Image: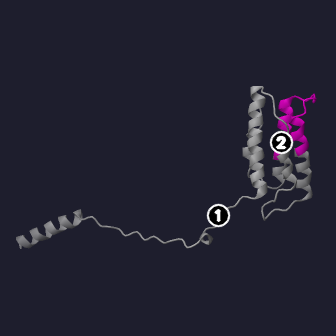
Amino acid sequence: MKNISFIFAILFLISCNTIKEEKVETSEVNSVEDFDLYTPSEMSLHMNDMFEFNEEIKKKIIAGEPLDDFPENFLKIHSAKLSDAKNRNETFEAYSKTFIESEKEIFNSASTIPLKDRYNNAINTCVMCHKTECVGPIPRIKKLLIN
């Protein structure tokens, strides 16, 4: 009886030290259709470009460096394709026109309004427009303001 117990104890210890191999099953993806990837709209990409440009303007204003000319590609705001769920409306059109005017004013060297104020006015126009439709980027846009 002692021999049987001893054999079971050894078998138990051996079985505890045995490494189990886990078989991981993988499946192949047959097509891109299996994923629902986000594709940014033309307008979204354009707004990201405008954000980056305004980041550079902010740095130049803070550093006291001269500004380049008004970027004509900003005018794409009137024609860039919006995401499928969005449509141009009167509010968007009004804000986009005001934004372009405000942005052009930044580059108006004859203006009597301080450059920092002109810049902040343009950025605040972005914030006001986004409050009416697409509120997600507002915290990011507010980071462009010069305090």
Q: Position of residue 64 (x, y in %)?
A: 78, 25
- How packed is label 2: few (under 14 Cα within 10 Å), some, or many (20 or more)? few
In the displayed structure image, the side of residue 28 where residue 110 appears, left or right: right
Return the x and y of residue 126 as percentages of the image width and height.
82, 46
Residue linked to disc 2: 71
Q: Main secondary structure of the magenta part?
A: helix
> Which is more foreground, mark 2 or mark 1?
2
**85 relative position to 100: left or right:** left
Vertical relation: 125 (above or below) 28 = above
- Asked if residue 120 is among those painted magenta in the image, a careful observer would answer yes
Mark 1 element type: loop
- In this picture, which residue range is highlighted in magenta? 100-126
* Mark 2 residue type: Pro
Asked if labels 1 and 2 touch by Cβ distance under 8 angstroms, the answer is: no
Q: Earlier in the sequence, mark 2 or mark 1?
A: 1
Is residue 27 placed above or below 50 in the rendered structure? below
What separation in Å lies between label 2 and label 1 (alpha carbons)? 31 Å
Nearest to the observer: residue 44 or residue 133: 44
| Residue ID for mark 1 | 37
Where does residue 42 sit, x and y in percent of width and height?
77, 57
Give the quadrant of residue 134: bottom right
Q: Amino acid at mark 1?
A: Leu
Which quadrant holds residue 121? top right
